[in-house]
Every structure is written in structure tokens, then in C-alpha cells.
Image (tube, rainbow, N blue to C red):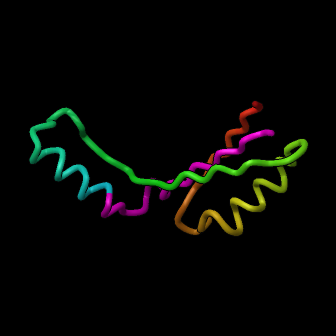
Amino acid sequence: MPLVVVDVMLKPEISDPQGQAVLGALTRLGHQGVRAVRQGKRFELEVSGPVDESAIHEIADTLLANPVIEDFIVHIHER
């Protein structure tokens, strides 16, 4: 059964307040080497049968990500 992973991230030009909060916490904890943090979402879809990549991209573009402010990458893992 194939596993499809969709990683969704804010577009680079969109401010990421959660990433900035994590970066601030890392700095306070003494981790000075981290320059930037971006936070995203990961979706795992178990698919029965062969993967229809165009259908997966449609799902990601219409339901999992907001294409105005987010980009997504699809990874297909055969098991």
C-alpha cells in the first residue's frame, strides 16, 4: 500500500510567526547557531492501488494547502 506524504509550508515571502517564536525560544535556550525556523504541516495518505499523482496534487491544492500563501511537495513511498 503506497504512502503519500504531502509537506505544506508557507511561501517564503509570507511571515511565519510560529517559526519566529520557535527561533526566539531556541535563542533563549542557548542555541545560537540556528538562523531561521519555518513551521509547516505534514499529511500522510495511505492509498490503495496505484497512486494517481494528478489526483494527489488536486487534493493537496484544494484541501491540504492554501495555494495563495502555501506551497506543497508530494513524496510517494512504495512499501
Provide residue 62's location: percent of width, then percent of height.
71, 68
Q: Is residue 13 left or right of residue 19?
A: right
Quadrant of the rendering where the N terminus is positioned = top right
Residue furthest toward the right?
Answer: 49
Query: Image check: 65 left or right of 76?
Result: left
Along the horizontal axis of the image, is 44 left or right of 30?
right
The relative height of residue 8 versus residue 15 in the rendered view (above or below) is: above
Question: Does the magenta portion include 15?
Answer: yes
Residue 63 drawn in magenta: no
Q: Examine the image and state in which quarter residue 70 appears.
A: bottom right
Where in the figure is residue 32, as x and y percent of width and height?
14, 36
The residue segment tinted magenta is 1-18
* Residue at 72%, 34% in the rendered image: 77
Judge left or right: residue 79 versus residue 71.
right
Name the residue: 9% across, 38% down.
30
> x%, y% of residue 55?
83, 56
Q: Quarter holding the C terminus?
A: top right
Q: Position of residue 14 (x, y in %)?
A: 42, 62
- The answer to which of 37 and 3 lies nearer the viewer is 3
Q: Establish if 13 lies above or below 50.
A: below
Numbered marks: total: 0
Residue 66 vs 45, above or below: the answer is below
Residue in the image at 9% along x and 47% along y: 28
Which quadrant of the view contains residue 16? bottom left
Residue sitting at x 68%, y 68%: 63
